[in-house]
Structure formats: C-alpha cells, structure tokens
Amino acid sequence: MREIEIKLRIKDFKGLEEKLRERGCILSSPIRQEDIIYSKAGSTSEWEVSKEGQIVMRIRRANDHAEFNLKEQRSNEMDNLEYETAVDNPNAIHQILARLGFEPQVEVKKVRRKGKLGEYEICLDAVDELGNFVELEKLTSEDADPNEVREELFKTLEDLGLSRKDEETRGYDTQMYFLSKK
C-alpha cells in the first residue's frame, strides 16, 4: 500500500482539537510511541539525500505491543510504500536486522493522538526534542499521483485554518538524525 502524507508544524494543539471535534473527528487517547529506525550499517545516504527506492525499517513500541515497519521511498520522504506487522518479540527482530547488516540509527519518541478525518488518518504528535506536528495521510494505490494527493491533503488542512507554509518535508527520523549531528 502507498502512503502519502503531509506534515505541518503546529503551535495550537487545543485549537486544532476543537476544530477536529466540530468536524466529527474523535482523537484517540494519547499513545506513547518509541521508535528505533534501522538502516544499512555504515550508511548515511538515506538520511542525507532523499531518493526513490531508499529503504528504512523501524521497530515501534507502544504500550504493551510492538510493530515492525518497512518503508520504501517513492517521490519524497512523505510518499512511501509501507509494509507493517505486529511482532511478539522485537528483540528477535533486532537480532535478525543486525544479522542482515542493519543497525539502529535513530530513536524517535513521541506522544500521538490519532483519528479519522473522512477518508484520511490524522495524527497530532508531540515529538521529544522536535516539537508539535499534525500529519494527514492517505492510503492510495501504488500508481497514485503524489502531487494530486498532496493538494487534496493540503486543502483539507487549510480548511482547518492551517497553512502549507508550516510544512515539514522531512520525517521525524531524518530530523532526529540531523539534530544528533549538531
């Protein structure tokens, strides 16, 4: 499945929550997520240059469960083919990845609230060390036009009073990677 999303920095979580409620969007209770992102041992290219075909994998722990996720980048960092599954033993997945030549590169910790806004998933994220964001995503066919989908997503967020000038085009993992290099 192809996931196309946009991410905006936001200042007013409460105001956005109210506008979402007015549109019938119910947000989940806060979920603490801790992600470890893996890439090929010794490689930095997936962080420094965004290009189609790059693969990044993640083990996400949230509450009492864990998931394994693989993202293959398409047109940009917010456009990926995504594969995800629950895992019973995240430590075993870590060992498998290590044996395959992948190593942990970045950790991302956040509190997320998510909901449905029509056909889209919306997430309000308070990301440790990075700040507050809203993500809006659409699951599409693999041949979807990413520019058309992005415009559709922007229009939805602009209808909520948000501005595309606040867009963040890098994933949390990439932002954390560069933050750790300062």
Image (tube, helix red, strand yellow):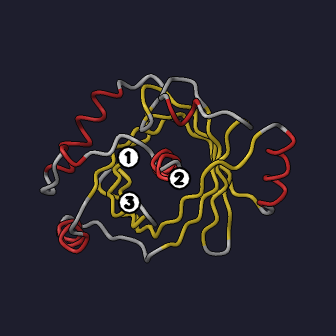
Looking at the picture, how far across and down is residue 156, in whole percent? 20, 48
61 relative to 102, above or below: below
Task: Look at 67% across and 74% down and name the residue there.
Answer: 64
Q: What amino acid does circle 2 point to?
A: Ser
- Image quadrant where residue 116 sits: bottom left
**Helix, strand or loop for disc 3:** strand
Please name which of the two marks, 2 or 1, marks the residue nearer to the observer.
2
Looking at the picture, how far across and down is residue 127, in whole percent? 43, 64
Neighbour class for label 2 at 10 Å: few (<14), some, many (≥20)?
A: few
Task: Look at 36% across and 70% down and name the residue there.
Answer: 27
Neighbour class for label 1 at 10 Å: few (<14), some, many (≥20)?
A: many
Q: What amino acid does circle 3 point to?
A: Cys
Distance, label 3 to label 2, CA atoms, is: 25 Å
Distance, label 3 to label 1, CA atoms, is: 9 Å
Task: Look at 46% across and 39% down and name the residue there.
Answer: 3
Q: What is the number of the mark on residue 180?
A: 2
Pick the residue in front: 163 or 50: 50
**Helix, strand or loop for disc 2:** helix
159 relative to 63, above or below: above
Q: Do the residues bearing badges 3 and 1 touch, measured as CB atoms within 8 Å? A: yes
- Outermost residue, bottom side: 29
Looking at the picture, how far across and down is residue 143, in whole percent? 44, 22
Question: Which residue does the numbered mark 3 point to in the structure image?
Answer: 123
Looking at the picture, how far across and down is residue 23, in whole percent? 19, 64
- Image quadrant where residue 17 sits: bottom left
Left or right, 110 with respect to 159, comes to right
Task: Look at 81% across and 37% down and name the residue there.
Answer: 101
Pick the residue in front: 132 or 27: 132
Question: Which residue does the numbered mark 1 point to in the structure image?
Answer: 137
